[in-house]
Structure formats: structure tokens, C-alpha cells
Image (spheres, grey):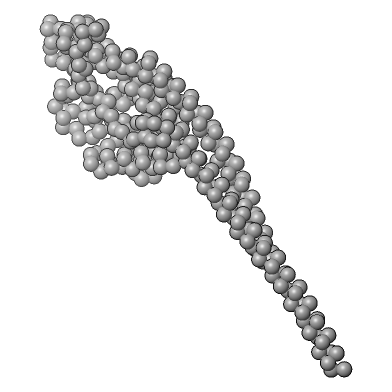
Amino acid sequence: MAEQIQAIKRHINSVKNTEKITGAMKLISAAKLKQSTDHLIYTKEHIEPLISKFKQVLTCDIAPDLYCEENLEMRRFEEGTVTESQKDSIKELCILITSCKGLCGGYNSSLIKHAADMKESVATIFSPLGDKGFNYCSRHGFEVFAVEEFADTYAEHAHELSYEQIYKLSSAILELYRKSEISKIKIVYTKYRNPIAFDIDTQLLLPIEKASSDKDDDINNNGIFDHDSGTRYFDEIAEAYLSMKILRYIAESTLCEHAARRIAMKNANDNAVKMIEMLSNKYHTARQNAITGEMIEIIVGNESQKLKKVQRIIGE
């Protein structure tokens, strides 16, 4: 009985230590959630307008005097204007954004399952940003884009990647698209709904749907965009466009990650508190049983002594 009581006591102390850790992690995740919310708001206010302008340029019309076979290549980023070789390519590239840390509930597993389902439906090359997704793709034999060149980028925290790193990766991915080795570029990320809910979403990055006309825009997509810089002008804009889109989705995914981790740590903390209460009741029950057993032994011993004394008197 004494060993059982000591085992329960050690278990209680262990759970209390875990409860302290999960409580601290919950507070840290709550603070990071606030920072990530501010970062996403900043991204929407400053990066999305640039993305919109780049999108208009990439889908604008070409001046009639430049409308030749060579310059038709400038429109290859627009949906509906892909080349025949791109149509023949069945491969797609998927940028998968996961975290580098666990303890965030089903956040990573949901993303990975969604990406695996995509692979089953169409041949897919993966560009995983985040150690969890990168390790899964490597272990399960998924085709990873330029794994030797970008292994360090894939294994790093997505939200810690610099614009230069994202731009370099975007340029390499776009080179595949230019060579018609892939037909589409997609991104799988978590879409933020509220502090307790998010959705797994897939967005098509390339080819681009043509932007709707807006009279107030600096660039009118129904008008004519005149240029003499050749296709490189569009290539550089496409690289910047893709880089900013990735950064924007990383910001939203990071917010969802911290929200998921805060919820997971809150649930773990609550469960630890309930377990401590349950173990405490078990400990007190075992302790009371031990005390009761000792009292019974004392009473039985005392009664036994009395009985022996009575028997001795009767025998005399």
C-alpha cells in the first residue's frame, strides 16, 4: 500500500511539472498569436496592393505592333494562354507550408494529408516550406523540387525565411514553368477564420486569372500595355509576384499555427489540471485506506490481546 501511495504521488508531481510547461507554452503562443495577427494585417495592407498591380501587368494586353510570335510568350502567365507543351504536361508543383515544431494539434497532419490527396489525383512535385512537411515528403518518397539546392530553405521555419530566400526559390520554380515542365503552380496553406478555427486551402498561383477591369486602377487590363523590354520584364515581375504571394500565405499560415498551438496547449493544460484532481482523489483514497487498514490492525490486535487475557483468566 505504501508503494502504491508513493507511485501516485510521483505521478502527481510529474503531471504538475507538465502542467507548468503547457501553461507557459500557452502564454507564449498567445503572445505570438498577437504578433502574427499584426503581421498579417501589415501584409494585407502593404503587400496585397503590390500583388494586385503585378497581377494586372502580367495579364494586360499587348500593343498591336508588338503582337508577334516571340511576344506571345509574355502572356504565358495568364490563364487560358498556356502553350501546347504546357497543356501536354500533367505535372503540377505544390508549395506546402507546414511548421517546424509540433505540439499544435492536427495542424501539420491535416496539411500533409491534404497534400497527399493531391498527389493521388495528379502527378505533383512538392516544394515543402517547413521541416514537418519536408521530412514527410522525404520519408514517403514524394518528389521534392531541387532538394539538394533548397534543403536548408525547406528545413527552416517558413516565417523566418527572408525575401531573398523566397525570391531565389520562386525564380527556380518559375524556370520549370517557363520550360513547360509543370503546368500549374499551387500552394497549400491554412486559411485563418478565427482564433479557434482554420481551414486547409489550396490556391492556384500560376497561371493567373485575368484581373477584372477597374477604372480607378493605374493599369487598365482592358487597355493596352506598351513595352519594349522583351520577355525579361514580365519574368522579373512574375518572380516578384510569386515571391510576395508566398510570403503573404506564409504570414497567414503562421497565424494559424500559433492559434492551433495555443488551443492544443490550453487543452493539454486543462487535461493536466483534471488529471491532477483525479490523481489527488486517488491518492487521498489510497491514504485513507492505508490509515483504515492500520486502525483495523491495531483494533484486531487489541481485541486479540483482550481475548487471550480472558482465556488465561478462565484457564486459571
Q: Is residue 215 above or below residue 25?
A: above
Quarter of the picture containing the N terminus is: bottom right
Q: Is residue 211 left or right of residue 282?
A: left
Q: In what quadrant of the picture does the C terminus appear?
A: bottom right
Dividing the picture into quadrants, the one containing residue 220 is top left
Vertical comparison of 48 with 277: above or below: above
As drawn, the residue found furthest toward the right would be 316
Quarter of the rendering containing residue 288 = bottom right
Q: Is residue 283 visible?
A: yes
Residue drawn at x 59%, y 50% as measured from the top left: 276
Q: Quadrant of residue 126?
A: top left
Q: In screen coordinates, is 293 left or right of 316?
A: left
Q: Nearer the viewer, residue 257 or 243?
A: 257
In this orientation, which residue lies closer to the viewer: 36 or 99? Answer: 36
Q: Is residue 67 above or below residue 24?
A: above
Q: Residue at x 58, y 44 (%)?
A: 19
Q: Position of residue 179 (x, y in %)?
A: 23, 25
Indicate whether 284 appears above or below 108: below
Residue drawn at 54 percent across, 36 percent down = 25
Percent x, y for residue 18? 58, 45
Extreme residue toward the bottom, this view: 315
In the picture, measured across the screen, residue 228 lies left or right of residue 267, that is left
Q: Position of residue 94 (x, y in %)?
A: 30, 33
Q: Does any portion of residue 7 appear in the rendered image? A: no
Which residue is pictured at 49% across the width and 43% down the height? Answer: 267
